[in-house]
Image (tube, helix red, strand yellow):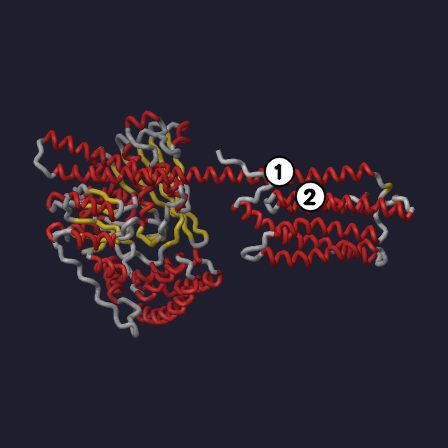
C-alpha cells in the first residue's frame, strides 16, 4: 500500500492545480470583499467625519484592493512564484491586524480586544487559506493570526498600564483575559479544521486518482489481452479456412466448419470485450460525418435478414415523416447499436415479427433528436429483471445465457454508444408479449446527401456471389465494429473471410497462405494500410499478389493518389455499404490497378468546382424527379458564409475543438457538391486544428476565404 502523504508535505500535482484555482478565486474575492467593505465606512464618514474608525476601515479596504490587484496579476501567470500562496495567506491576516493596530493607536483598543466584527474577519482570512489546498499555508495563516492577535492584546494591556487608563468603555465593556484566551483557542480550532479539510480533500483526491488509475489499468489490460488473444485466433481461423479448401469427408468438413464457426464466435466475444474496455478507458472515438439514414437502417436490417428468415420471422422498418434524409453523426456506431438490438430481438423471438421504427424529435440549437424503437413479439422481460439488462456480463435471466448464448455485453455497449451520440436508451417489456428497446441520438441535419445510395432490393437479395466467384478474402481492420459489419456483409454474399487487426497481422497471414483479395483499412495501429500494401508489393511474388482494396473514410484526391502510389487497386468508402463492397468484389478478376484520377491542374488556376460531381447529382435528381442540385446549392450558398464566420470566431477564441468541428463540416458539404478546393483547404484547416497549430490555421483561413469567393459565383451560375 502506498504511504499516505505527511501532513506538511508539498501538495500533489492535482491538489496544486486545485490550489492555483483557489488562489485565483481568493484574489478576486479579496478585491470584491474589500470593495464592498469600503462602502460601510464611507456612509459613517458622511455622518461623522471626525470619527477615526471609518477612516481606518476605508484605508484598510483600499489598501486591500490595491494589494489584491497586484496579487491577481501574479496569480494569473503561467508559472506563479512558489512564495505567492504563503505571502497571500499571511497578507490576509496582516491586513486585519494592521487595521486593529490603527484602532489601538487612535485610542480605541477595546474595539480590538472586545469587538466581534473585526475579530470575525480573521476567520474569513483563514477560510481563504483553505482554498490553496496546502496544509502548510493553513498552518502559516493560523500561526500568523494567533501571534499577531496575541501581540496586539499584550500591547494593549501594556499600553493601558503605562498610561494608567483602565480598559473599559460603554460600547465594548471591560477587558477580560479569559475572553482573549477563548479567542486564541478559537483561532487554533479554525486552523485545525482548515488543515483537516485540506488533508481530507487531498486523501479523497488521491483515492479517486488511484481508482481511476486502477480502472485505466484494467481497461488497458483487457485491451492488450484481447489483442494478444485475437492474434493467434486469427491464425487458427486462417488455417481452418485453408483446411476447408482441401479434400475432406463430409464428417471432417462438418467438424472443421464447426470449429471455425466457434472460433468466429470467440472472436466476436473478444471484440465486445475490446469495445467495452475502450469505452471504460475513454478511448472510444466518435467520428461524425454526413450519411444517408435509410442506407444505415437497410444495412443493419440486411445483416439480420438471413437470420430472421431462417426462423420464419418478419423483419421490416418504418421511417416517419419529418425524419431528415441525411444527418451528421457516426454511422458505424449507429449501425452497431441497431445490429445489436435487432440481433437480440431476433434471438429472443421464436415467432412473429421484429419491427424498427424511426421518428423525429424536437430540434434545439441546430441538433435534431431522432428516436428509434426496436419492437419484437418475443418472450419479453419480467419487470423486476429489467434493471440487470444494462450491466456488463449480465442478462435478464442467467439461464438465458445457457439457452440463447451471449456475453451480456451487447446492450451495455449499445447504451454507452447511445450516450456518446448524445442520446439515451431504455426498454419497455411485458412477459410473453415482447419487448420494445428505445433509444435516441442527436445530430445535425446534413446539408447535402452523400453520393452513395441504397441499392435496389433485388440487388440485396441476389444470388450468393461466392458460389459464382469464389475468393479467399482477408479483412484488415482494427475497429471491431467495422470488422463485424464487414464479415456479416461478406457472409451475405457467401464468403467467409479471415481477419487481421493491423499491418503486421496482415503480413503474417499472407506468409501462411495466399489470398485473392485484401480489404485494407488505411488507418491501422502499428502499421497502417499504405505501408502494409507497400510491403506486400515488395515482398511477395507476382503469383501471390492479391488485389488490395482500400477501406477509407477519406475520398479526397490526395488520399486516393496516396493509395494508388502505395499499390492499392480500388477503394470502398466507409461506412461500408453492401453495393460498394459487392462491386469491389466483382472486380477481383481484374488485377490491374485502378487508373488514378487525372493530375491536378497547375497551381496558378485550379478549377474550384468539379463539374462532373454536379452532373452526377443532376442525373440522380432526374431519376428521382427532384431538383436536388438547386436545393443543395441554395443551402450551400446560405450556410457557407455562416460557417466561415464560425471559423473566424473559433480562431479568434483560439478554440481548436470548435474549429475542428466547423472545418470538418465545411469539408464534408463542399466535397459532396464538388467544391474541391474549399474541401481540400477545409481538410488542411481541420488537421491544423486537431494538431493545435492555430498559427498555420490563420494562413489557411485567408486561402479558404479566397477559394470560397471564387466558388460561390460559379455555384450561382450552375444553379441557373
Q: To which quarter of the image does residue 563 belong?
A: bottom left
Q: To which quarter of the image does residue 233 belong?
A: top left
Which disc, if any, is residue 322? none
Query: Which residue is drawn at the image coordinates 62% and 38% (left, top)?
Result: 196
Looking at marks 2 and 1 on the same chain, the residue that comes earlier in the sequence is marked by 2
Relative vertical location of residue 634 with respect to residue 92 in this rendering, above or below:
below
Query: Which residue is drawn at the image coordinates 83% and 56% (left, top)?
Result: 47
Tag count in the figure? 2
Asked which secondary structure carries label 1, the reply is helix
Indicate the quadrant containing the C terminus: top left, top right, bottom left or bottom right.
bottom left
Relative vertical location of residue 37 with respect to residue 401 in this rendering, above or below:
below
User: Measured from the top left, where is residue 43 in percent x and y?
Assistant: 79, 56
Query: Which residue is drawn at the image coordinates 32% and 32% (left, top)?
Result: 407
Asked which secondary structure carries label 2, the reply is helix
Q: Say which residue label 1 marks.
A: 196
Q: Say which residue label 2 marks.
A: 142
Q: Can residue 297 be seen in this snapshot?
A: no
User: Measured from the top left, where is residue 403 in percent x and y?
Assistant: 28, 26
Classed neighbour count for the residue bearing mark 2: other residues with Cα under 10 Å, few (<14), some (14–19), many (≥20): many
What is the spatial separation of the Cα atoms under label 2 and label 1, in whole angstroms? 13 Å
The residue furthest bottom is 604
Q: Nearer the viewer, residue 111 or 135?
A: 135
The residue furthest top is 399
Classed neighbour count for the residue bearing mark 1: other residues with Cα under 10 Å, few (<14), some (14–19), many (≥20): some
User: Measured from the top left, where is residue 216 in percent x and y?
Assistant: 41, 40
Side (left or right) of 365 relative to 24: left
Whether label 2 touches label 1, CB < 8 Å? no
Amino acid at each position: 500500500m502506498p504511504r499516505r502523504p505527511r501532513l506538511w508535505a508539498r501538495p500533489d500535482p492535482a491538489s496544486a492545480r486545485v490550489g492555483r484555482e483557489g488562489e485565483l478565486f481568493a484574489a478576486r474575492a479579496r478585491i470584491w470583499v474589500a470593495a464592498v467593505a469600503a462602502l460601510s465606512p464611507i456612509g459613517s464618514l458622511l455622518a461623522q467625519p471626525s470619527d477615526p474608525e471609518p477612516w481606518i476601515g476605508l484605508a484598510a479596504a483600499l489598501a486591500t484592493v490595491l494589494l489584491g490587484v497586484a496579487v491577481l496579476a501574479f496569480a494569473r501567470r503561467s508559472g506563479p512564484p512558489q512564495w505567492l500562496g504563503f505571502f497571500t495567506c499571511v497578507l490576509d491576516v496582516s491586513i486585519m491586524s494592521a487595521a486593529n493596530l490603527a484602532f489601538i493607536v487612535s485610542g480605541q483598543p477595546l474595539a480590538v480586544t472586545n469587538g466581534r466584527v473585526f475579530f470575525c474577519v480573521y476567520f474569513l482570512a483563514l477560510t481563504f487559506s483553505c482554498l490553496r489546498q496546502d496544509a502548510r499555508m493553513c498552518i502559516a495563516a493560523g500561526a500568523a493570526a494567533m501571534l499577531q492577535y496575541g501581540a496586539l492584546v499584550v500591547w494593549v494591556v501594556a499600553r493601558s498600564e503605562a498610561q494608567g487608563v483602565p480598559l473599559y468603555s460603554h460600547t465594548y465593556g471591560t477587558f477580560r483575559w479569559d475572553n482573549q484566551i477563548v479567542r486564541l483557542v478559537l483561532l487554533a480550532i479554525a486552523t485545525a479544521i482548515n488543515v483537516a479539510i485540506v488533508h481530507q480533500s487531498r486523501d479523497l483526491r488521491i483515492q479517486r486518482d488511484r481508482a481511476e488509475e486502477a480502472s485505466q489499468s484494467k481497461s488497458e489490460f483487457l485491451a492488450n489481452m484481447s489483442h494478444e488473444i485475437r492474434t493467434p485466433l486469427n491464425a487458427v481461423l486462417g488455417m481452418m479456412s485453408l483446411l476447408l479448401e482441401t479434400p475432406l469427408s463430409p464428417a471432417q468438413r462438418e467438424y472443421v466448419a464447426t470449429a471455425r464457426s466457434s472460433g468466429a464466435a470467440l472472436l466476436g466475444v473478444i471484440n465486445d470485450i475490446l469495445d467495452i474496455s475502450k469505452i471504460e478507458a475513454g478511448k472510444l472515438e466518435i467520428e461524425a460525418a454526413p450519411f444517408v439514414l435509410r442506407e444505415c437502417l437497410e444495412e443493419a436490417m440486411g445483416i439480420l435478414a438471413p437470420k430472421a428468415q431462417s426462423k420464419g420471422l418478419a423483419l421490416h422498418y418504418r421511417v416517419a415523416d419529418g425524419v431528415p434524409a441525411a444527418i451528421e453523426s457516426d454511422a458505424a456506431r449507429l449501425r452497431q447499436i441497431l445490429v445489436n438490438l435487432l440481433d437480440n430481438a431476433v434471438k429472443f423471438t421464436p415467432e412473429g415479427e421484429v419491427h424498427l421504427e424511426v421518428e423525429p424529435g424536437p430540434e434545439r440549437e441546430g441538433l435534431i433528436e431522432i428516436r428509434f424503437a426496436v419492437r419484437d413479439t418475443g418472450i419479453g422481460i419480467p419487470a423486476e429483471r429489467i434493471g440487470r439488462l444494462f450491466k456488463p456480463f449480465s442478462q435478464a435471466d442467467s439461464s438465458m445465457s445457457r439457452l440463447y448464448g451471449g456475453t451480456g455485453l451487447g446492450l451495455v455497449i449499445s447504451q454507452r454508444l447511445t450516450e456518446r451520440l448524445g442520446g439515451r436508451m431504455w426498454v419497455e417489456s411485458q412477459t410473453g408479449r415482447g419487448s420494445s428497446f428505445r433509444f435516441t441520438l442527436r445530430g445535425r441535419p446534413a446539408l447535402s446527401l452523400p453520393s452513395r445510395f441504397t441499392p435496389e432490393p433485388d440487388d440485396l437479395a441476389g444470388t450468393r456471389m461466392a458460389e459464382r466467384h469464389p475468393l479467399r478474402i482477408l479483412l484488415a481492420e482494427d475497429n471491431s465494429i467495422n470488422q463485424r459489419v464487414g464479415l456479416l456483409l461478406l457472409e451475405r454474399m457467401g464468403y467467409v473471410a479471415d481477419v487481421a487487426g493491423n499491418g503486421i497481422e496482415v503480413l503474417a497471414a499472407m506468409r501462411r497462405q495466399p489470398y485473392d483479395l485484401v480489404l485494407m483499412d488505411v488507418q491501422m495501429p502499428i502499421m497502417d494500410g499504405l505501408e502494409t500494401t507497400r510491403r506486400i508489393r515488395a515482398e511477395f511474388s507476382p503469383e501471390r499478389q492479391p488485389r488490395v482494396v482500400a477501406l477509407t473514410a477519406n475520398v479526397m484526391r490526395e488520399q486516393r493518389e496516396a493509395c494508388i502510389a502505395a499499390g492499392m487497386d480500388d477503394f470502398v468508402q466507409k461506412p461500408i455499404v453492401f453495393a460498394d463492397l459487392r462491386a469491389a468484389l466483382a472486380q477481383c478478376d481484374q488485377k490491374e490497378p485502378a487508373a488514378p484520377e487525372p493530375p491536378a491542374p497547375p497551381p496558378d488556376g485550379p478549377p474550384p468546382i468539379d463539374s462532373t460531381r454536379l452532373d452526377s447529382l443532376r442525373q440522380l435528381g432526374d431519376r428521382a424527379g427532384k431538383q436536388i442540385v438547386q436545393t443543395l446549392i441554395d443551402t450551400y450558398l446560405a450556410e457557407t458564409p455562416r460557417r466561415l464566420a464560425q471559423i473566424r470566431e473559433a480562431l479568434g477564441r483560439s478554440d481548436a475543438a470548435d474549429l475542428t468541428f466547423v472545418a470538418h463540416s465545411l469539408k464534408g458539404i463542399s466535397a459532396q457538391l464538388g467544391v474541391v478546393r474549399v474541401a481540400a483547404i477545409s481538410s488542411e484547416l481541420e488537421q491544423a486544428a486537431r494538431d493545435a497549430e492555430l498559427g498555420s490555421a490563420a494562413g489557411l483561413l485567408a486561402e479558404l476565404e479566397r477559394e470560397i469567393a471564387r466558388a460561390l459565383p460559379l455555384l450561382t451560375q450552375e444553379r441557373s
